Amino acid sequence: MLNRRYVRGLLLILSIVVVCAPGCGLLQRNQSPEELFSRALSGIAGKETLSFDGEAGLRRESSGLFENQFKFEGKLENHDRLTLQTRLPGAVTAVGTGVNGVNAAAVNNNGQASGFSASFERKQGQWMALTAEHEPLRGSLSRFNPIAQMESIDRLNKTIKSEYGSGRRTQILRIELAPKDAKTWALAQLHDEMNAIRAEYMHKASKVKGASQEKLEKDLNKVWEQGETSMEQMMKQANVQTVYHLTVDRKTSLPLRLSSESQVDYKDMNNKSNKEALVTDVNFRSYE
């Protein structure tokens, strides 16, 4: 009699597990936010192909409006090869603006839609640009690689919390970087972009013929050095706050959406206080 009750009870437990496991998220709810993030990162790292689209914009406190907005899309192939493509109403040039330095200007004599693409390959855990160094926006586009963003987040000091409003099928994680790490990372990305801008314009200068080439290169180096110094000085006393929101599919543990806001408070060279925020939003469309 006792054995029958034991078996009956065991079967009941097993039936609950079998019915619940595919959809109710019982196991996922027992995981910590840190474990959920780790599973999402592992899930995306194991995919051979995926695609996503997103948009980015710079918001200044002085106007409250978004500036330099643009859309982009990306596709991962063969596990380690990623192509990012901007979607703009004109050809793209790279010009630094403010501390965040994002300015995707559209210029096209024919008024036809065009954009810019850059390719990256993951080698020994690092994403290396395959696009020539002098190509416009090569450095800027690298910061919009959501896979690289998640990999970098994993290495940084951070606080991860479950966000209220998560549904039955999804879990939203709020990830706030430690201020010191957020600032160090932001500065590293800005240096990459500054170097890319320098490479682009020095490449153009190299095509100038005659004695004016040397003078032009000298002037460009001077302007770049001044810009680099100004950025360093502004960032030295700046405060950086970076927050991500990651939406994860409860069933597959794969990321569905990654949005971020990196806010920088700084004083410009005239000692005037400024506040600006780089906002991004990426939606993952397909996995294979």
Image (spheres, rainbow, N blue to C red):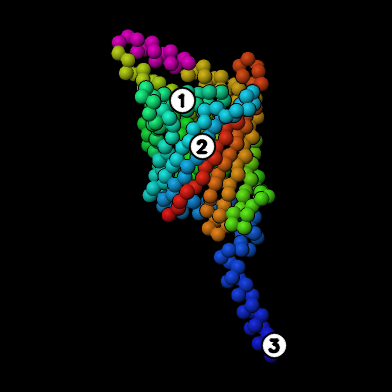
Marks 3, 2: nearer the viewer: 2
Element type at mark 1: strand
Query: Residue at label 3?
Result: 2
Quadrant containing the N terminus is bottom right
Looking at the picture, tell me which residue is in the foreground, 133 or 89.
89
Looking at the picture, tell me which residue is in the foreground, 111 or 212.
111
| Mark 3: amino acid | Leu
Most extreme residue toward the right is 2
Q: Position of residue 144 (x, y in %)?
A: 49, 37
Query: Residue at label 1?
Result: 105
Residue at left offset 48%, top offset 36%:
71
Most extreme residue toward the left is 209
Residue at left offset 44%, top offset 26%:
106
Label 3: few (<14), some or many (≥20) within 10 Å?
A: few
Residue 55 has which mark?
2
Magenta span contains residue 117 = no
